[in-house]
Image: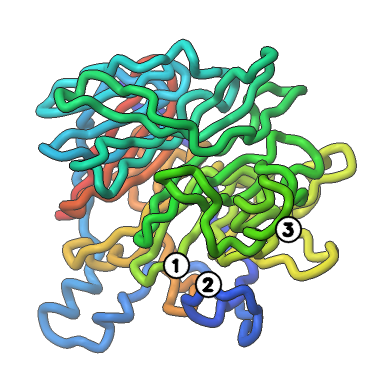
Amino acid sequence: MRRLSVLVLPLLLGPLIACGGSSQADSAAGSAPSTTASGDLAVPEATASGSGGTAAAARAVPRLAVSRLVTGLDHPWDVRELPGGRLIYTQRERATLSIWRDGRSTTLRFPSSSVWVSGETGLMGLEVDPDFARTRRVYTCQGATTTGGGHDVRVVAWRLDDAYRTATYARTLVKGLPVSRQQPGRHGGCRLLIAKDGSLYVGTGDAATTGTSRSLTSLGGKTLRLDRRTGAPWPTNRWIRSAVKAKRYVFTYGHRNVQGLAQRRDGSIWSIEQGTNRDDEVNYLARGRDYGWNPGPGYDESRPMTDQSLPGYQWPARWRSGDPTLATSGGDFVDGTRWGAYDGTLAVAALKAGRVVFLRFDSKGRLTGTREPSELQQDGRIRTVHQRANGDLLVTTDNGGGDDAILLVTPR
């Protein structure tokens, strides 16, 4: 098994803003500046006042057992569970959709040739319908070729057959997510999340193009919210009554390249965003908010990730890497008492840093501690983290060359 050496990068924590609770209201009332320092993970609030063995177990930091569950992959971008112990996963450049079960992978019959692959774009984000047993639906975010020979990124629904051999096209939910002309495929996003209320969130990239993230007529540099069944904009979106169709999809804007989306147990939605040479970010999302990315003129990447010199209010990140960045990507909230001090944390994959960073936030969304376990610093670049229904973590590597894997991570 190949192991990659990685540079140990410092984790710098910057100013944070309290969110005033877990409500996703538009108002900033009640928010106040707050600064925290880096440190070990705090005791989970729900168990901090306990006593005896329960409290001690909650405080403990478990050792992590890491095994290579699926091997021989090339840039696996996302992974989800299906019934019967199956996993379904995407590979970005191979543009394949595959099923794993009992130690064996099968590539689905799927129109890989229709996926546009260039640079950072290909077959990317993946979600499974909560009602999969009835609908047989899965969703992908992928590059595509448009009529006339251009390209875009789009979200597509597929139906799996009963034998798990074929993925048949069902419908395109949203298309027209922009791609870069100068550097084709750069900043293509694209993460999917089906929330507890059934809505589908889409994290998009700004296509490395000035003005995209701040334009409400563009789907780039945003998080979008839509109906997973029909592709219609979600009815409570802020601009749902706009005459401009793209604007009706916008949930938040002012993002650079959203690579991760996760929902906390309190129902709040969080994004993980890649920075330039500074300030990867984790953001608490709420309807209609501006997160301040504005690289113009000339796509000036020396601009701050959250530029508070812009008109209006730009919401600061809840965590930021500082300089140098870690190249954060996908992540998930970790739940379960057997995870001890990791219970309730956000596990964030880091590509450049080759690790997983666990971040703890309090009930108001303020950072209280971080941890980078050594067991997850042995496999090179990490693309995403996803928690299984049984509580174990699935972690994908992103080194290329056919030696990538889906890792199984369990606490012990």
Mark 2 is surrounded, within 10 Å at the Cα level, by few (under 14), some (14 to 19) or many (20 or more) other residues, namely: some
Q: Name the residue located 49 percent from the left edge and 43 percent from the top edge.
A: 231
Q: Position of residue 29 (x, y in %)?
A: 65, 85
Q: Position of residue 265 (x, y in %)?
A: 34, 67
**Circle 1: residue type:** Ser
Q: Which mark is residue 191?
A: none
| Mark 3 or 2, nearer chain start | 2
Q: Is residue 64 left or right of residue 306?
A: left
Mark 3, residue position = 292
Mark 1 is surrounded, within 10 Å at the Cα level, by few (under 14), some (14 to 19) or many (20 or more) other residues, namely: some
Which residue is nearer to you in this view: 360 or 110? 110
Q: Position of residue 117 (x, y in %)?
A: 54, 18
Mark 3 vs mark 1: give the one in front. 1
**Circle 3: residue type:** Gly
Q: Which mark is residue 24?
A: 2
Mark 3 is surrounded, within 10 Å at the Cα level, by few (under 14), some (14 to 19) or many (20 or more) other residues, namely: many
Q: Do residues under tags 2 and 1 come within 8 Å of each other at their CB atoms?
A: yes
Q: Secondary structure at mark 3?
A: loop
Which residue is nearer to you in this view: 168 or 298? 168
Q: Name the residue located 77 percent from the left edge and 23 percent from the top edge.
A: 182
